[in-house]
Amino acid sequence: MTVTETRFDRWIFESFPVTAEGLGMLRIFSALFIIFFLIPGQGSSHFVYLSTLPVDFFAPPPGPLMIFDGFPSYAVFQLLHTVLLFSIAGLLLGYYTKLSSIVAGLAILSLQGLIYSIGKVNHEIFIAMVPIVMAFSNWGAAFSIDSIRKGARHEVHGWPVTMLALLIGFMMFTAAFPKILGGWLDLSTQATQGHLFNQFFVRERDALLATWFVNLDNGLFWELLDWSTVLFEAGFLFAVMSGKWFKRFVCLAVLFHFSTMMMLNIAFLPNFLAYAVFLNWTRIYEANLTLYRRFSGKRGEKSKKHSVWLLTGIVIIFFTGLSYLSSKNLILSGSDLTLYEAVLVSGAFATVVFLAGLTIHSVLFHRTQFTPNRHS
Amino acid sequence: MMSKKTIKYLFVGVMIWLPVQYGIVGIVGFYHSEPWPAFVFPGFKNVYIYEGGFEIAKTEFVVYPGESGEPISLQPQELFPEIPLSQVPGFMRTHFSDASNIKTFSPQAINWLEIQAKRAAGDVPVRMDVVGLIEYYSISDSGAVRDSLTETTRTSVNFVSR
């Protein structure tokens, strides 16, 4: 084996070490995140609308959807939706996890394709790609029905995480390249400000800090945003080569999306499903277990599972409450930004700030116990 | 379970495929529209700039109710509230930016538009104009100010002559 091959191998297989417990936590969180917030169409009323659109408005993007000559009937949407719900339930419970993950991903892709056939593609492919790619990590090895079945395999794999990093890095680069060609780095133009105007005046995205930014006339500020956006997006591709650097770029991405939400009212929530893969899930599992044992006083083997079930229950209650409050349109009612998007993106922002604070603290005080870049 | 060798081949394949599909997306997107599924993010290439200000293209609908009613201007998201806001500009670009396309709408499509216009305007419409506009904004000390508004296209959809 040559040096290059060894380095290539290390990059694929060792960039993002994983454990069964960490992946199990990630699987449960991902399934809940999709069920509550990322189901394409967000319910049957949109499917009813699409299925009644005249054929004149069927404009599928070039690709597999072109085999259709119009929107399918509502029954087809319902069938796909049902398949998706059952497969996501399988993913959540870890029942035939690999198959459930892949079927869920394919059902999401099918629904997305039909939704985009009104003539506009949204870039939400990670809702489907996370379950499809992570299916090969054996993320059903812990806290699942699969794990208690006879002959269950407990070996887990980190290479799907590297694959996701590669996809994210490349896709970020595809966001940067047109900006370079389009003149974002031209000092005489302030592209970010132009996009803010477009979102504000045409799409009426005027919530949060949008109005304040519209009235901010500082060429240097806007030009710095143009440059930093391009450098950040292009740099993602190079960060893929190092697990440590990639996680730092994921943190930057969270800050980037938070600022985009505050300014342009665009949350880009589907990306957060992919970013969440790079959290230290083993560390989260261990911290949760420690807390559970401290408060329950239980120390046995069962406490491992019980701690996860308890946290899952808390997340379900939180997501249910958040969904319910969002559906009431009490806040952000005049915006297409939803309450749950604002809360979840802000939560991710707070998490990154917290992790950065811990890192700075550990560096300043030479503490080595906390290693935020060590992946579970 | 895949062998390490297979996984390495998979990575090499993906690393070759990603730039190739990006090239395909660029070519097909230029001549037709953006393909899907594809591993790309939106570029937001446009800078919307003109001589120190900004220009923004938009579409409006003007609904003409029965004889006595005043014309009612509607934003696309008011006429098509079920379409997510993120998809509205693409929906407009695909179906309402070309007059020849609008003029060839089927009776079924015109009937559907009439229902949407009636629902949004609250009156029985006799006609609806699809109006292409360009707004020009300049930056002043008091913030962004609209300089002017230019109508670029106007295409009528008649509901009564069917």
Image (cartoon, rainbow, N blue to C red):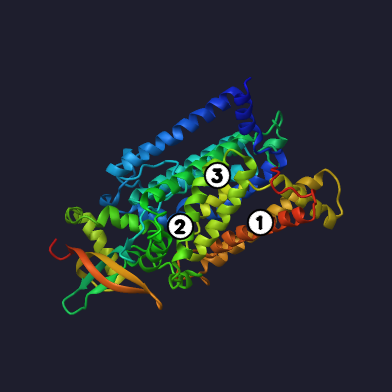
User: Residue at the location (41% across, 56% down)?
Assistant: A46
Measured Cα–Cα span from mark 2 to mark 3: 44 Å
Q: Is residue A3 above or below residue A21?
A: above
Residue A153 point in image, percent of width and height: 69, 30
Q: Amino acid at mark 3?
A: Phe
Q: Chain for mark 3?
A: A
Q: Amino acid at mark 2?
A: Asp
User: Residue at the location (80% across, 52% down)?
Assistant: A366
Q: Give the residue pinned by disc 3.
A: A86
Labels 2 and 3 in the same subunit: yes
Q: Is residue A211 above or below residue B13?
A: below
Q: Give the residue pinned by disc 2.
A: A226
**Residue A100 appears in the figure:** no
Q: Chain for mark 2?
A: A
Of residues B103 and A262, the one nearer the viewer is A262
Q: Residue furthest top?
A: A1
Measured Cα–Cα span from mark 2 to mark 1: 37 Å
User: Residue at the location (65% across, 39% down)?
Assistant: A16
Q: Is residue A217 above or below residue A256?
A: below
